[in-house]
Image (cartoon, rainbow, N blue to C red):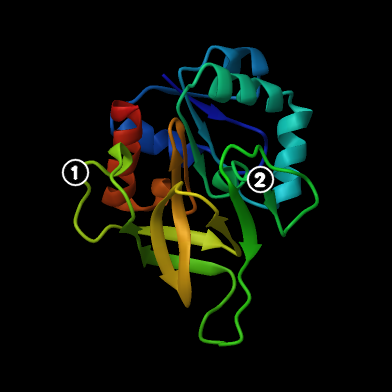
Amino acid sequence: MITIVDYKVGNLGSIQNMLKKIGAKSQITSDPVILESAEKIILPGVGAFDTGVESLKKYNMWEVLNKKVLIEKKPILGICLGAQLLCKESEEGKHKGLGWIDATVKKFNFENREFKVPHIGWNYTKLQKESRLFKEMYDDPKFYFVHSYYMQVADDSGLTETNYSFKFDSAIENNNVLGVQFHPEKSHKFGMKLLENFVKEY
């Protein structure tokens, strides 16, 4: 059973539908008691960093997530804002993130008007190290992005790089903590394979 965290910052139905297509059972919850029993966790999210932090705390999920991930070592996959919340901090807000990944979230700022903000659409990822998340992935994997901020990793947690005027970390992994800046639930066969790997390999 995959537990999808509902902290009221995004539409979760598309993630659950993609999991259903690969035969994975899932539940969406904003109840910290249900989250306490989770075996695998997906932390989605769209919108502002501070709003995400405040919502997790409002629904009493912040400390539960720390317990599940840091003490019980349960696998977690952050998606978009959910991935950014795994980092230490963001230029977007004043609150601290969960801090499980040694990374800072920075804003795209281009002088070249060819590159629009937000970064929207399909883009390629390049794997930086071996990972079960990309096991038997299709050649030239590309995923769907919608974001104005990007992750800049300070250690070896960077999993994939994507080029949008410059290279940025588009996926991260440190033991049981995984995050993707893109939306696997909107990325057709590539996203389906990635979610299938999360379900089966972790």
Q: In this view, does 137 lie to the left or right of 40?
A: left
Q: Is residue 24 left or right of residue 31?
A: left
Q: Position of residue 75 (x, y in %)?
A: 45, 27
Q: Position of residue 53 (x, y in %)?
A: 73, 40
Residue at 73% in and 58% down: 92
Residue at image mark 2: 88
Q: How many marks?
A: 2
What amino acid is at disc 2?
A: Lys
Viewer-side residue, 106 vs 24: 106
Compared with 123, 85 (above or below) is above
What amino acid is at disc 1?
A: Glu
Viewer-side residue, 144 vs 107: 107
Q: In which quarter of the image is the N terminus?
A: top left
Number of the label disc, if any, that sits on residue 66: none
Q: Position of residue 156 (x, y in %)?
A: 45, 48
Q: Quadrant of the C terminus?
A: top left
Residue at 53% in and 38% down: 12
Q: Is mark 2 on a helix, strand or loop?
A: loop
Q: What element carries label 1?
A: loop
Q: In this view, does 21 lie to the left or right of 86?
A: left
Number of the label disc, if any, that sits on residue 136: 1
Compared with 181, 167 (above or below) is below
Q: In this view, does 123 lie to the left or right of 43?
A: left
Viewer-side residue, 74 vs 36: 74
Which quarter of the figure has residue 176?
top left
Residue at 57% in and 87% down: 113
Q: How crowded is mark 2: few (under 14 residues within 10 Å), some or many (20 or more)?
A: some
Of pointers 2 and 1, the one earlier in the residue sequence: 2
Q: Residues within 10 Å of mark 1 (few under 14, many from 20)?
A: few
